[in-house]
Amino acid sequence: MRPLLIFGASRGVGLELARLECAAGRYVVAPVRRQSDVTALADTGAIVEHCDALSPTDVAGVMSRISGDFEIVSTLGGQARDGRRADDEGNINVIDAAVATGRVRRLLLVTSIGCGEMAPFRSARAIAAFGAAVDAKTRAEERLRATTLDWTILRPGGLVSEPATGRGLLLQGADVHGFIHRADVAQLASRALRDPDTIGHAYAAVDAQRIIPHQYP
Ligand SMILES: NC(=O)c1ccc[n+]([C@@H]2O[C@H](COP(=O)([O-])OP(=O)(O)OC[C@H]3O[C@@H](n4cnc5c(N)ncnc54)[C@H](OP(=O)(O)O)[C@@H]3O)[C@@H](O)[C@H]2O)c1
């Protein structure tokens, strides 16, 4: 297994993925902001590095310190005080730096239900609540799709912080809605990294028992 660089591993899906991959014996590097709480992350065995994903220099620096070929997962999300977003800018920095190394083939990006071709199926409430974040994530998806990397995009539904259920599903319908536990998204990501059939595809990630049928107006 190649080393795995996980952006966004301080919490949530990224942290759960660091747990899984370290337990599977993989060398995991976790770039996190200087102010991040890394208590849980340090317990996984991942190598913690300081990196602000909004800084192209920081991102390139982290990658330059890994020797040989490596893989990347990004679960980056959120907005800085100055309005810049990790959802687009941070992820785009990661994608561009990965391409520039020439040592990354596999990159898995975690975005959100509602991105890309799913946009027309968003509710007015979803657009008001997180439309800007989802649009930003779509810009990152577009940057990734334009590369020649072996990419996979996972778009989780509403995230729940509960133990894994094993019921996570990857679906391709543009109108899929639902919820999923963060630990299940991590399991799906871990599996997708090892499944070449997922290369070049974007999937909604939902709990098989928490799929919500789309309400047509
Ligand atoms: N909440 C939902 O229901 C929902 C639904 C669908 C999709 N999503 C998306 O799914 C992904 C995983 O969500 P989650 O809730 O598990 O994680 P999350 O809590 O949104 O975590 C985001 C991660 O990004 C990191 N980050 C943000 N800005 C950064 C920067 N400038 N430099 C470095 N790291 C930065 C955060 O680090 P810090 O600890 O430093 O803040 C954190 O580790 C996210 O992209 C989220 O937007 C969320």
Image (cartoon, helix red, strand yellow):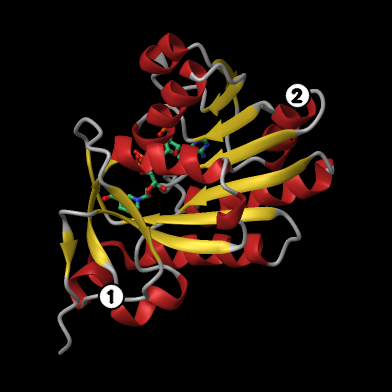
The residue sitting at 53% across, 50% down in the picture is 109
Is residue 90 visible to the viewer in this orientation of the structure? no
How far across and how far down the image is residue 142, in percent? Answer: 60, 67
Is residue 99 visible to the viewer in this orientation of the structure? yes
How far across and how far down the image is residue 64, in percent? Answer: 79, 29
Which residue position is annotated with label 2? 66
Who is closer to the viewer here, 185 or 144? 185
Who is closer to the viewer here, 18 or 10? 18
How far across and how far down the image is residue 58, in percent? Answer: 68, 33
Quadrant placement of the N terminus: top right
Q: CA distance from mark 1 to mark 2?
A: 39 Å
Which residue position is annotated with label 1? 122
Q: Alpha-carbon neighbours of circle 2 within 10 Å: few (<14), some, or many (≥20)?
A: some
Q: Alpha-carbon neighbours of circle 1 within 10 Å: few (<14), some, or many (≥20)?
A: some
Image side of residue 68 versus residue 105, left or right: right
The residue sitting at 29% across, 79% down in the picture is 121
Quadrant hosting ligand 1 = top left
Image side of residue 141 versus residue 211, left or right: right
The residue sitting at 55% across, 66% down in the picture is 139
Name which residue type carries label 1.
Answer: Arg
